[in-house]
Image (spheres, rainbow, N blue to C red):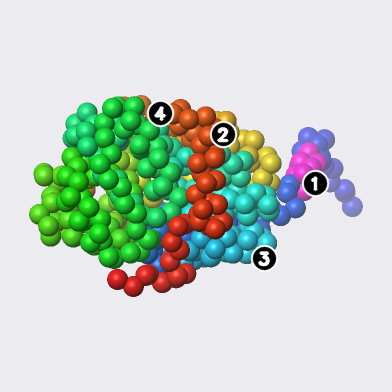
Amino acid sequence: MMQSKISPKILALFVTVILVVGVWLLVRPASSGAPIRVGVLHSLTGTMAVSERSVVDATLFAIEEVNRRGGLLGRKMVPIVVDGQSDGPAFAREAERLLTREHVTYLFGCWTSASRKMVKPVVEHYQGLLFYPVQYEGVEASPNIIYTGAAPNQQIIPAVKWASDNLGKRFYLVGSDYIFPRMAHTIMREVIAALEDEVVGEHYMPLGAHDVQAVIDDIVRTQPAVILNTINGSSNLPFFTQLRAVGIDSQTLPTISFSITEEELRSMHVADMAGDYAAWTYFQSVEGARSQAFIENIRSRYGPERVVTDPMEAAYIGVLLWAQAVELAGTVDLPAVRTVLHNLSFEAPGGMVYLDGQTQHTWKIVRIGQVQRHGQFAIVWTSGKPVRPVPFPVYRSRSEWQRVLDSFFVAWGQHWSHTVPTAGKEPAP
């Protein structure tokens, strides 16, 4: 009986394959193939739900996009979506539950600065990483937060300067009564003083408040040239409705808003809003192939009537920047991912975005848009190129800004909101 011989080349190839497979089995992550669980933490109920639900949709869309590409490191992303209930303490509780009981490391979420401030010590204590997708007041930089929304010099400061140059010199400041509007108005007053303009009045109302008569009466009395609006959530509807009821429109007294997007306009009387302004780093009306693809893909997923917004784009950016970092690091371990995240760039729908390694904020193009009757914004001004983020405005030192911030927290009894709405419920009209 004859025995067949294996040629030396085939034997060598066989041994090589065995060695390669063996090495791969030794060095591959032990959890390879296991889903990567991430937390999605936003308000699905309460006064902020009108703004945050669409950001949840954009976050989930970005996760689905990553999964369609095969996931990360051969693993699918699994989002754990929880409700912050428009309530700071609820955000803190849910963040802790996600990081401990749900065993996630990465969170995507928060809108109001009051909610972010409650989540910040939680992610720092448990060594998680929060991707925060909304413009804010600055005066913060945490190693456990990536800020993909605008810093003050990418929204608040240029908008006030533009308004002074184009709309008028007498400003009225109105906002919800929590840390973002309070700090934003402090920055605005610094800018207005530097421009030698005037603040003629200032008013705050609780988040979710519907009684706006006092602020309307004060606006009528003080006769400003421009309103700077930092009201968040559902209170914007009664505010603008009542403005129009007393004969104030965008022609007689223009308003620049800092938290109204295309999504909020859908729940408001758009025709009455036409002619007013908003400051963001992205609008749906931004031209370009990437912006158009973003719009079409969102509509393909959620329906032809859906709009896209700045916080939606920032949430989308956050997920894809993180995914890019995981792929480059070759692991989901936080120390390695954080190292790779620094100085990453991403060609976003609104233009090229860079993550600043020193501050963990993003370089972004600044834009001001004017509300149109069809619910979109016509872009009337742009910085033209990405602006470097400066979370601590130059008008005061970092320590001075921190003292101002702390003074609100202490005065409000260790809260980041002056008046706190009931968790999960909108305050009564």
Q: Nearer the viewer, residue 118 or 82?
A: 118
Inspect the image, locate mark 2, and give the three-letter code of the amino acid beneath it: Ser
Image position of 385 with respect to 367: above or below:
above
Amino acid type of the residue tagged 4 in the rendering? Val
Report x, y in % for residue 283.
29, 43
User: Would you call the spot at circle 1 few (<14 residues within 10 Å), some (14-19), or many (20 or more)?
Assistant: few
Quote the CA–CA distance across marks 2 and 1. Answer: 50 Å
Dot 2: element = helix
From the image, which quarter does the C terminus lie in? bottom left
Tag of residue 26: 1
What amino acid is at disc 1? Leu
- Between disc 2 and disc 3, the foreground one is 2
- State the CA–CA distance, disc 3 to disc 4: 39 Å
Residue at 33% across, 41% down:
280
Upstream in sequence: badge 3 or badge 1: 1
Residue 122: x and y in percent read 63, 55
* Contact flag, marks 4 and 1 (Cβ < 8 Å): no
Which residue is labeled 4 in the image? Answer: 387
Real-space Cα separation, disc 2 to disc 3, in angstroms: 36 Å
